[in-house]
Amino acid sequence: MLLVPCPHCGPMNAGDLTYNGESHRRPDPKTCTPKEWRTYLYLRENPSGWLLENWYCSSGCRKHFKIERHTLTGELRAPVLPGRKPGATQGDMK
Amino acid sequence: MSYRLPAPLGNAIDRSSAISFTWNGKKLKGFEGDTIASALLANGEHILGRSMKYHRPRGVLTADFWDPNTTVQVDDEPNVRASHRKLADGMAVSAQNVWPSLKFDVKAANGLVGRFLTAGFYYKTFMKPAKLWPTYEHVLAKFAPGGAVDLNTPHGRYDKRYAHPDVVVAGGGPSGMAAALAAAEAGSSVMLVEHEHQLGGHLLWGSDDDQVAATELAASCEAAGVEILSNSTVAGRYEDNWISISQRNHPGVIERLIKARAKTLVVAAGTIERPYVFQGNDLPGVMTSGGAQRLIRMYGVKPGTRAVVFTANESGDSAVEALQSAGISIARVVDARSGEGITSASGSKSRVKRVTLSDGATVDCDLLVTAVGWTTPTSLLNMAGDRPVYDADAARFFPAGPPDNVLATGGMVGDGSRNELIAHGRATGELAAGRAVVVRHRIQAATARATPVDGQEPDYPADERTPLDRARHPEVYRSTTHGIVDYSEDVSSKDLFSAAGEGFDSVELIKRFTTATMGPSQGKLETVNTVAMLAEARNETIAEVGTTMWRPPYAPISLGALAGRINEPTRVSVLQSWHEANGATPILAGQWVRPEHYGDPAAEVLNTRTNVGIIDVTPLGKLDLQGPDVPKLLSLLYTNKWMALPIGGVRYGLMCAEDGVVLDDGVTARLDEEHYLMTTTSSGAAKIWHWIEMWLQTEHPDWQVHVTPVTTGLTSINIAGPNSRELLGRLTDDIDLDPDAFPYMNVRRGTIAGVENCIAWRIGFTGELSYEIHVPSGHAVHVWGQLLEQGADLGVKAFGLEAQRIMRLEKGHFIVGQDTDGLSKAPVTGLNPLLKLDKDDWAGMPEVAWTIESGDHPVIVACQPDNGSVVPEEAAQILRAGTTEIVGRITSSRMSPTLNRSICLAQVTKEFATPGTSLEVLLVSGERITATVQEHHAHFDPEGARLRG
Amino acid sequence: MAKHRRVDYRPNRHRTSQAQVDVAIDESSGLLIRRHGLELDIGLGPRRAKPVKEPWDELKGGRVDKTQTQTTTGTNTKLFRRPGNPLRRDQKLSCVRQKSCAVGSQRHSPRGALKERKTEVGFELPDLLTECRLGDVKAVGGPSEVQFLGHGDEGVEAPQVRQVTHLQIISILLNSLLHPHERIGQTESMGKNKPPAKYSAVGLLWRGLRKQSWPRVWREPEFKNTYDVVIIGGGVHGLATAYYLASNHGITNVAVIDKQYLGSGGSGRNTAIVRSNYLTPEGVAFYDRSLDLYHSMSNDLNLNVMFSERGHLTLAHTDSALRTMNWRAEVNKLQGINSSVITPAEIKKLAPSLDVSADTRYPILGALYHPPGGTIRHDAVVWGYARSADAYGIDLHQKTEVLDILVEGGSGPKGKGPGGKVTGVRTSKGDIHAPTVVNCTAGWASQLSNMTGVTLPITTHPLQAAVTEPVKTFLPTVVVSGSLHVYVSQTDRGELVFGASVDPVATYNMGGTLEFTEELAGHVLELMPGISKMRLLRQWAGLCDMTPDYSPVMGPTPVDGFFVDVGWGTYGFKAGPVSGEQMAACVANGATPELIKPFELSRFTEGTLVGEKGAAAVGH
């Protein structure tokens, strides 16, 4: 099982976290077109490579955080809490 | 006749301890330490099973775990590996895949028509007439190999363990032991896992010196604090060195699954000896050099009396020595290194009798030992992403380059003397320990902490091991004749050639077409031979053909061990013991066990409508929200407005997902200036908590809201019915229950039955005057008891989930997930006044707005069958009259005890939603009935006079 | 004049190949062999295949009109676009229509290659013998058919109507018994437009006796630079699309490209379960058509796909699950699907290994029982389509990776994206010019689509499966539990095959997880407590292209000439045949058939999702 480094709790078994998928910008609900909104809802880049995505430390500190993960190799880098810059303190575990 | 050899041969058995067992009903004896197979051979039982397809007699080939045709039934356990499982007293062992008996098998007739049953023959026939295929299939299924499952087998004791060792070493041969020892000496915590019953690997059946060395190394490991797991298998290596270990000898359990997060993994799985492919290679009496040596040296069993040895390497040479030490006469040594060869073996039904050599000469014998080379079991390295590479000079595959935290040693990476193997193992152990230190440092560094980890990260040790040499080895795979390649699947080299000729000529296609390598040994014996045959058929090199991926587990692992102790928790309210004591019928609702009813749900409804009822609604999700920005949060998540909810006010709210689909609903109360209590549906409790946290942390991290789930911290009781005010009034002094002071949709806090800090709000799912009280759970049993005691004269009775469902349906309240579904956008509920499109933002708003704009959506309506005695099933379809066009469905239905007629909620298309519309409902029975759409969702008291009273 | 008795087509069981022959018994005088104009009415639904009126419908009693039964090569070749001269879509349309009009006389002869060697147009025994097996002819006592495996060949004509007397039939039988080698020998050659060797019991027997090997199943074709259609993905979907393009639409200048070997993706990794008891009418109609095609597949493709119609149980452990089962049963019933909710006692009879007692953690309250569901040998489906597509001359390029899809005139960067037009693909073996590219790549669908500038509503998740060591068979049906996220069936070899729902984390890594096997074992033992001593032998994973509404994405895209058949999630295998059939129609006709209209990509921008989630969340 993948070890995912929660910025608070440290490396956690991925099964102890909740995966929230690709990170997406939410359009302004007042002004967006159906196409923009549904692009936000449904369309995904789904790359085979590095992906910025959202995780939720649901069995630990209950923080949402973003992390870059390589969807083929499982490598992880730069976990970060929302609203902060990628932390320099977190090392690469592997 | 006994085939048991005298001591000192047989280092694994204890001759002082005899064991009785039965073989196909016959009583036999063996010794402590025997495997089932060695005991059988010692008793002169050479045929242990029959092959899958042709039912050819088969005996011991390798005398280890991978022995392909020696799986037997032991009591209620199928597929026991006789060459690995230790004999136990009283075992009832029987042969599998035989009918009617091992000696005489009717299905052996298949062998006569073998030439027609080529690999994949079934793809080419049985097509016509199509009607007969099920019959053919039935017959084919009769040929399913394997033992029989006793479906009454109890779930015995299995267990699991988590471990966090620095180093896991897979394989307890000389290199593995040396690696474990070196790593432990370097300060690592080490688990050494050996597949067989004792440490030593090939030293166990080697020379006397080898055996002494094995004993010494094992003792050193133990002394150094290495945790030794014998009869255990490293079954899998998953991401980030998540290692699964199947431990088969833990006291008190049948099998234990160890899940270890190793910082480094050392793979020292050794090598597996390949069988040789030639005509007659599956006759009992044909065995590998390792097999013969194991039988003689470990179990003191004589595998035959007169042997031919076909050798291409030292293992064959040492087999000759072993045979001689056992007093077996050597009829002939055929040395592949000097160009000699064998072409076929022939024999009786039960035993090899004669071997034909390449030069045409024939030699009589009852044992043919082959030593033609090695397969590297690179499974664990495969799982770590490594793809092995073939070395033609050494005639075997080698690891290409596993990741840094996985290291291979021993026979997997090269050859050498015992001391060279030990030296390589030691170097590997030191490297593994050094890297484990760095990994440990990095894991600690990846955790935020007040005090940084001490010191700098240590240098990452480079791999400076002196590689083991690779001994040259001739490529000896197949003679000029065809033979069996996959023993457990009965696939011959001829099958492989013909499959390749038909175009199934990549290694994966040939595997799928012929099933070679797909049997119980999963290619450990067969893969390289399969690849070699394909290479020969394609006139390519083995390197060009490549190999298949080896998948977990390394060795089969029982479902019981994977499941562990069966533990599927349920949740109950603190009142559950009362419910059980009072005749509640339990119902599972998600994780919760709840009272469905206490005998008669209809009576519970009527009592609640006429007197007063109480229900335990603890599973209702409850979230305590505090902070100045709670109203903003509520406005964002609920579809209606929340900025002006006064203290003491309660409001209903509907939540949508971002696609506009109804997500959840519930009521939220403002308890204080910055303090709210939100309720969610029972099933939505966890989901909504996550939902709120997601919005707060990602979209609005500036909002000050603190969320605490209090679902089980507060026990929730709904008191409903005309007498509810009277009843609650008897239990509280500090809550003014006067309708003007405490009107509908309000909340008060106070003391109930002497319990402080209770919350009571006037809401009702039942449509009655009702109070929902939330009591600190430690006092809930007391409060519940007081309600029953104080309300006895008021007719108070507990009611269950079913009565509540009936009453909510009488009131026309929909249930999220029952009356709505995964596509039901908010307007489907008919609650359009609650959908405030003039707010700035709320989750799902754009989709809801567009849905309202288009008007193209189904609607929830209340309807009543015209014949009030018929209750259409929930899920009964509503059709356009006289057609099969579906225009809706019944989503909820019950017989109403209050109205004494059937009542329903339904989802219908807009066209059929107008009150008064007649609906045609197709009952499950096939009958069509009519029902009429009602004016209000509520079938009962649509004005709400009772609950507002 | 004798009555001409028509063959009972049973449209839902009909053969899809257009190159077919009816055999009807003229009760007084003999056997009428007639190529029928069975026209698949693509787009009108699953059960609408009907015979088309043909010129020779008036021909009774075996009268032959050579002017109608012969055709010229010239007419036929117009049906095919030539390399280097790709047709515009409207041209293609007209051609296809023309072909439909000329139905029958324009058909490709399955025996074309053989007929070519004959100078005389006429019915000859060896010809019939070449193609029809003993069993077929034997059945000529009642309504029957001699079914030809459809092998296309341009412009070569075959005889249309010939009278065969009973005497001839007897001689056919005798001949085939006495000289089976004649017919086997004739089909030995393998190559473009040559029919593959006929698989049959007689063939096995004969080759066994003569120790003769079978010819190749498909060619190793040369790499060409131009095709009319390039299909990316050599799994069931891609190969079926290719096959139906050829068999139903006469389009054979087609390449199927796969990065690895045929069937290396989901087609070879699924748990081979088929069923049609879905929740939405759209889903039911669609999958039912697929089941029909599976039913006739062994004979259509002359390769036994081992369809085991063993029944399919979906267990309900909760009230709400039972309600959904009832809902599905009702929708199914209205659409003529055999599917009903049964009680625990009935479940116990069907699958005695299940624990149906009431006091378990997940009590079995009932089940949706679907007798037509079952399992099929998944690899055989791949091989059957590949072999037949190859016989039509379609090129199957294995170990060929698509590096880019070439698009011109689009609104995005490099001329890609909406408004653009596909011009070809760049592969590891070179560029291919093609006006039409079909993406049938399942887990890698997003990667391929992104190459054209089309973003899909797809995330890729692994779906894991596992198999146990074999034991004597004890589980006669397929068992699915949505609440416990597990499904299980037992193969004829005795192994239990397990699957679950997709892993929650999107990834392209197929390594598998330990947790999957732990959960699986725990849940299976909840259902069948007696099998704890069975051992897990192997686990593996495949990649699933999951969509938000658990329904596929099929049809055209905003890039002209770029079609998708993706988003198949966990249920792609069940839908392979119908997807191929419908995608072929979509590509050939330039219009989306009705059956797949609900699954167009545009539904995601229009917000009209399909509500299949309830029935497909554990998609088996």
Image (cartoon, rainbow, N blue to C red):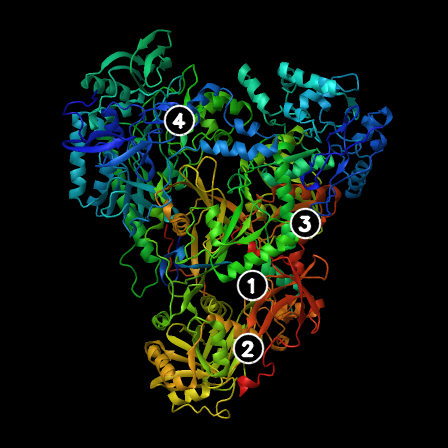
Query: Which dot, 3 or 4, sits closer to the camera?
Result: 4
Nearer to us in this view, B390 or C287: C287
Task: Determine whether the residue tagged by mark 1 lies in a helix, strand or loop.
Answer: loop
Chain letter of the residue carrying label 4:
B
Number of numbered discs overlaid on the protein picture:
4
Residue identified by numbered label 4: B51
Crowd class of label 1 (few under 14; some 14 to 19; many from 20; radius 10 Å)? few
Same chain assignment for discs 3 and 4: no
Residue identified by numbered label 3: C596
Q: Is residue B513 left or right of residue C140?
A: left
Name the amino acid, label 2: Thr
Chain letter of the residue carrying label 1:
A
Mark 2 to mark 4: distance in Å? 70 Å
Crowd class of label 3 (few under 14; some 14 to 19; many from 20; radius 10 Å)? many
Mark 2 to mark 3: distance in Å? 48 Å
Residue identified by numbered label 2: B898
Query: Which dot, 2 or 4, sits closer to the camera?
Result: 2
Nearer to us in this view, B765 or B552: B765
Query: Which dot, 2 or 3, sits closer to the camera?
Result: 2
Q: Is residue B196 left or right of residue C522?
A: left
Nearer to us in this view, B703 or B529: B529
Crowd class of label 2 (few under 14; some 14 to 19; many from 20; radius 10 Å)? some
Determine which quarter of the picture holds residue C531.
top left
Taking B843 as reference, is C519 above or below it?
above
Residue identified by numbered label 1: A25
Name the amino acid, label 4: Ser
Name the amino acid, label 1: Arg
Mark 1 to mark 2: distance in Å? 52 Å
Q: Are marks 1 and 2 in contact (CB under 8 Å)?
A: no
**Is any atom of residue C261 visible in this view?**
no
Task: Determine whether the residue tagged by mark 2 lies in a helix, strand or loop.
Answer: loop
